[in-house]
């Protein structure tokens, strides 16, 4: 029997130390729907949006979150007992915010669970308060579990094979999110692979749960 | 002996070859020449290419589905934009507040104009450095480039001030912002004065430009492709700007004088007999006369820009309901205003979009290559009517307004317009401008604003129509947030003060 446990803890943060041009916004759809502000002295992934205040316009652009998570912690376990093996990979991301516009789309259609009261308030505040779209991107995911069985030689020696193994695995099995997140999968980026402008959710497909049966035979 | 040669001489030979050949391994990107090249070593071809680039840049974001014509159409109640991709076409453009932080809504219609203004400045700066023929251009050819480029630059400034109005705009933008800082905002009056000066300066250049330009003009400028005829286009723009100043800035006599001179030097063809029912006799000829003018061109070739307002099924652009309710009948019991019938098609309304409904689509731009008017004879006729009205010649104004009613709308002439109260004539003029210049460039919004008719005036004017109580009419668009941030001001700033 052997048991192998592996864990990787990863954390990073960024700060722009030098910017030879004035601060500028990038990514997103506009400040009233969440954008990223590249500003000297601040995190490169800070999310800005409209926040109500006493100014003549009624609102001003303020930092309202940061897309960068506090840390990423992955766990790998590999247990082998006799011919059986069990492998599991899980990942925990803590912190970071995302802009959930899927809920905004549901609000506009009047089909969010908390319509008409809470969603009516959100719609009335649209344009003046972007903080209502900011939700936590914390998640715990069970990415893969694989159960394998190494077949005894008697089962496959008639084929002339050297070894054979069957396994069943499941991927994207479990997603546990913070209670402030109302979407389906917080690992999201509406604009694809972007260095800065990630974590914007507009009705994306969540990752599918999949199950695999594998038979591997070595000759 | 030969072994010596190959082992010692060969490397020496090769290195000598490399040393002479590899002076500069940098090969420039010939498809995207650097601006430095054009500013320091301009040649005739490069300057001609850059001049034609100013024409190309002038039409950016004009006929986009969320560009100048479309956004100004929504703000002015000519159209709706039912694009399903973003609710802000309705929530922000109709409900508000307009936010300079939305690059395609409140903060729209700014960057593309200043990009082209910069293009024009790049060409003007290159001309200072450019030498004489054959590598360069002759003085007359340079004057031709200056005249055309300054006219297009003035047009871009006009489109900016049409959107931002009293917020002003920066005009002294031909500078290096790293060393010289950002250009300061100046007031609307000063922006209009700057536009007028640019147009006049362009005419002075064009008069020295000889009989032909050194470059070809796009097909939208057909009929205005020589310096003499291009001056007519320039003067048409000057006439529009002068009339705007008369109404917006209470400029009165000086601007009226400028307007008349400009109208007389433009391509305006005044009808000899304003009560002549030409349209009934010669509809094609009349339509051609009214349509004569200068246009933005579009094309569907590789890399070219198409006219995205071509939307016969109303998938995005829809007509505002007031277009039908405010259209007059051609005669009692007859069909509606011919301009409405020509420009608007009825389509199934479908589901309401955030409470708004429209069963109209526009028939004006029928293909991806249909041009968009910059200025036409029909507008010049209406500007002449405005001039007569402002000058006090109400019968003259009434005659021209009736001419447009009869020959463009196929309506009956309106009796008693020559002795009606001024407000009545203004209302009639504005209504004719709505249908004559429908969905061409935000004229309904601009006209209502400059005649103080955005909002209802009791007993005189009902205001711009709102389908829902939650719709708001806006007077101007905010300054884009990036422009404010670059000047260390908060978003939706008022750089000239509250």
Image: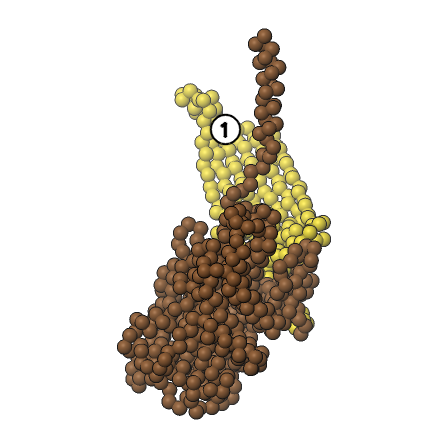
Chain colours: A yellow, B brown
Placement of the N terminus of chain A among the 4 image quadrants:
top right
Q: Is residue B153 above or below residue A172?
A: below
Residue B174 appears in the figure = yes
Badge 1: chain ID? A
From the viewer's perspective, tell me whether residue B468 is left or right of residue A21: left
Residue B95 pos. (x, y %): 53, 72
Give the residue pinned by disc 1: A150
Residue at 64% in and 58% down: B175
Residue at 57% in and 29% down: B21
Q: Residue most toward the top?
A: B1
Frontmost residue, B279 versus B313: B279
Frontmost residue, B298 versus B42: B42
Residue B349 appears in the figure = no
Where is residue A72, by image quadrant?
A: top right
Residue at 53% in and 59% down: B143
From the viewer's perspective, tell me whether residue B278 is left or right of residue B100: left
Residue B9 pos. (x, y %): 60, 16
From the viewer's perspective, tell me whether residue A138 is left or right of residue B241: right
Placement of the C terminus of chain A among the 4 image quadrants:
top left
Residue at 62% in and 46% down: A92
Residue A199 pos. (x, y %): 58, 53
Q: Is residue A46 above or below residue A160?
A: below
Could you tell me how many numbered marks the image carries?
Answer: 1
Residue B302 pos. (x, y %): 42, 50
Q: Residue most toward the left?
A: B281
- Mark 1 falls on what kind of element? strand
Frontmost residue, B448 versus A126: B448
Crowding at mark 1 (Cα within 10 Å: few <14, some 14-19, many 20+): some
């Amino acid at each position: 029997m052997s048991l192998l446990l592996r864990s990787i803890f990863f954390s990073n943060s960024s700060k722009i130390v030098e910017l030879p041009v004035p601060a500028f916004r990038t990514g997103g759809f506009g400040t009233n729907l969440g954008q990223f502000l590249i500003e000297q002295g601040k995190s490169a992934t800070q999310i800005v949006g409209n926040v109500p205040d006493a100014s003549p316009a009624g609102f001003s652009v303020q930092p309202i979150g940061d897309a960068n998570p506090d840390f990423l912690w992955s766990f790998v376990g590999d247990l082998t007992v006799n011919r059986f093996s069990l492998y599991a990979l899980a990942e925990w991301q803590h912190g970071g915010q995302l802009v959930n516009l899927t809920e905004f789309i549901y609000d506009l259609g009047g089909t969010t669970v908390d319509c008409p009261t809470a969603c009516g308030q959100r719609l009335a505040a649209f344009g003046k308060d972007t903080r209502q779209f900011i939700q936590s991107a914390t998640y715990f995911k069970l990415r893969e579990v694989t159960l394998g069985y190494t077949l005894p030689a008697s089962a496959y020696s008639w084929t002339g094979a050297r070894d054979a193994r069957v396994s069943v695995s499941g991927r994207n099995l479990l997603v546990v999110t913070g209670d402030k997140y109302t979407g389906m999968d917080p690992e999201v980026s509406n604009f694809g692979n972007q260095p800065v402008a990630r974590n914007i959710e507009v009705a994306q497909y969540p990752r599918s749960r999949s199950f695999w049966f594998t038979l591997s035979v070595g000759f | 002996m030969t072994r010596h040669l190959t082992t010692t001489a060969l490397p020496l030979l090769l290195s000598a070859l490399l040393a002479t050949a590899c002076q500069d391994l940098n090969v420039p990107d010939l498809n995207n020449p650097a601006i430095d090249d054009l500013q320091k070593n301009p040649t005739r071809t490069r300057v001609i290419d850059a001049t034609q680039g100013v024409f190309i840049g002038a039409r950016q974001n004009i006929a986009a589905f969320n560009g100048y014509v479309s956004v100004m159409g929504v703000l002015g109640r000519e159209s709706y934009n039912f694009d399903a991709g973003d609710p802000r076409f309705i929530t922000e453009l109709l409900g508000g507040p307009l936010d300079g932080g939305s690059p395609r809504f409140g903060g729209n219609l700014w960057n593309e104009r200043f990009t082209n203004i910069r293009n024009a400045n790049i060409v003007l700066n290159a001309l200072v450095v450019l030498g004489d023929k054959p590598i360069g251009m002759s003085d007359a050819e340079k004057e031709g480039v200056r005249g055309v480029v300054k006219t297009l630059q003035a047009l871009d400034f006009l489109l900016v001030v049409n959107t931002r109005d009293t917020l002003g705009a920066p005009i002294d933008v031909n500078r290096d912002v790293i060393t010289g800082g950002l250009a300061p905002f100046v007031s609307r009056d000063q922006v209009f004065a700057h536009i007028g000066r640019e147009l006049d300066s362009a005419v002075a250049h064009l008069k020295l430009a000889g009989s032909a330009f050194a470059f070809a003009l796009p097909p939208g400028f057909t009929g205005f492709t020589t310096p003499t005829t291009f001056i007519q286009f320039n003067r048409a723009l000057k006439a529009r700007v002068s009339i705007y100043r008369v109404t917006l800035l209470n400029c009165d006599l000086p601007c009226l004088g400028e307007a008349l001179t400009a109208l007389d030097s433009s391509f305006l063809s005044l009808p000899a007999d304003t009560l002549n029912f030409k349209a009934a006799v010669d509809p094609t000829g009349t339509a051609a006369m009214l349509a004569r003018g200068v246009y933005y061109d579009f094309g569907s070739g590789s890399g070219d820009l198409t006219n995205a307002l071509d939307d016969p099924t109303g998938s995005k652009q829809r007509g505002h309901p007031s277009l039908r309710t405010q259209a007059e009948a051609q005669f009692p019991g007859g069909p509606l205003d011919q301009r409405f019938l020509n420009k608007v098609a009825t389509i199934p309304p479908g589901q309401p979009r955030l409470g708004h409904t429209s069963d109209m689509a526009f028939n004006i731009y029928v293909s991806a290559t249909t041009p968009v008017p910059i200025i036409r004879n029909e507008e010049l006729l209406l500007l002449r009517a405005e001039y007569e009205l402002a000058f006090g010649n109400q019968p003259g104004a009434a005659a021209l307004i009736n001419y447009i009613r009869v020959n463009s709308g196929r309506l009956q002439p309106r009796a008693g317009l020559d002795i009606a109260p001024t407000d009545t004539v203004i209302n009639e003029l504005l209504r004719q401008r709505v249908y004559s210049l429908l969905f061409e460039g935000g004229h309904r919004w601009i006209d209502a604003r400059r005649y103080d008719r955005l909002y209802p005036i009791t007993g005189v004017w009902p205001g711009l129509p709102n389908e829902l109580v939650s719709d708001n009419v806006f007077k101007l668009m905010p300054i884009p947030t990036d422009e404010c941030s670059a000047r260390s001001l908060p978003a939706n700033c008022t750089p000239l003060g509250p």
